[in-house]
Image: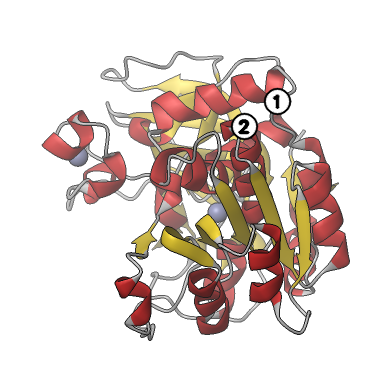
Amino acid sequence: MTTSVSGAVLREIGETLSIEQVHLSPITRHEVRVSVRACGICRSDLTVSSTDHGFPLPLMLGHEIAGVVEEVGSDVTHLQVGDHVVACPVNHCGTCDRCKTGQPILCPNGSATRRQPGEPPRATVGEAPLEQFIGIGGFAEQVVMHQNLVVRIPKEIPFDIACLLGCGVSTGLGAVLNAAAVRHGDTVLVVGCGGVGLNAVQGARIAGARRIIALDRSPDALLLAEQLGATDLVDAGDDDPVARVKELTGGLGVTHSFEMVGLPQTFELAMNALCKGGSAYLVGVQKPDAILGVPFRHFFEQKSVHGVAMGSTIPQIHIPEYAELYLQGRLQLDPLVADRITLDRVNEGLQRLRTGGVARSVIVFE
Ligand SMILES: [Zn+2]
Ligand SMILES: [Zn+2]
């Protein structure tokens, strides 16, 4: 039996989303059907709606979801009906060497979580197959997903907060704790304090970094960074922000810098602010064919550059851990939600990101 739900559909790049009736096909044995209770509006939803990244249309955006499991397939072992869950867009097969050695983000068989050729699409709108963005497509009352993208969370954590765990929190916290493994005594610079950068600040605080320097051009973002654990704030509009970072670190520069913006200038800044032997982590997204020029002098100083995707998250291990940190009061998520809106106001939420709001809008469903 198909299920009919309301969803916000992108039909043309650059257009607003339209609320339409979406049909979900019956689940298969590895899938779950989830009733969405909250869905954060993430910057990548905005990016993909406004510039062509090659996703098929019509497209269902939204991927930061929290909800309740309504139905599980016969081969789903880690979830039950009634579980509270979040989705995490690390598409991985779960059985290859990479997956088995704790590196699902490097899984070469990510498409294993998609329906295979010949199977009906999970979702349709009218007669057309509806593409679910990165395997989720959460701007809808319900979604059908592969079980590998779905993680159980404690029932105490509210949906409108929990939804952040799957993307913004995993990406920012994970870059610091998993990818860079920042430890006690390290000095950290976070370049760009939006939703993800603010979670990197918190990751550095949780890891016990000695200095946590937040850099942004927005006073509101810097204020929030301070509230979440930054020890020092640097205005990106300063004459020489790198000199300021060096000054704060005894003239040396930081051991770890995190680039959250995805611009050549901010990358350069993240490299220049490092101490000898320091490491820069690129979290901000650039166009796939963008070229980054790196002066060779950095490598004489044994600096290194690392790419990070989705905070190198192992969803089933890290997301429950982050949920626990929240419930213990050690991870602050409430300040990251600016407002709660209904699905029919999704375009306003996207617009809010466009106009540079620091915190997110979250869509809540009754
Ligand atoms: Zn996201
Ligand atoms: Zn795999």
* Disc 2 + disc 1, Cβ < 8 Å: yes
Numbered tag placed on residue 100 in the rendering: none
- Which amino acid, by three-letter code, is at mark 2? Ile
Q: Quick one: which residue is furthest to the front in this view?
A: 250
Does residue 119 appear anywhere in the picture?
no
Q: Where is residue 201 in the image (x, y as percent from the top left)?
A: 66, 47
Mark 2 near ligand 1 (CB under 8 Å)? no
Rendered image quadrant of residue 155: top right
- What residue sits 46% from the left and 80% below the top? 52
Total numbered labels: 2
Q: Where is residue 355 in the image (x, y as percent from the top left)?
A: 79, 74
Q: Mark 1 points at which residue?
A: 330
Q: Which of marks 2 and 1 is in front?
A: 2
Give the class, few, some or many, for how many residues have Cα within 10 Å of label 2's Cα (few <14, many ≥20). Answer: some
**Residue in front for this viewpoint, 58 or 114:** 114
**Residue in front for this viewpoint, 99 or 221:** 221
- Which amino acid, by three-letter code, is at mark 1? Arg
Q: How is the image coloured?
A: secondary structure
Q: Name the residue under label 2.
A: 206
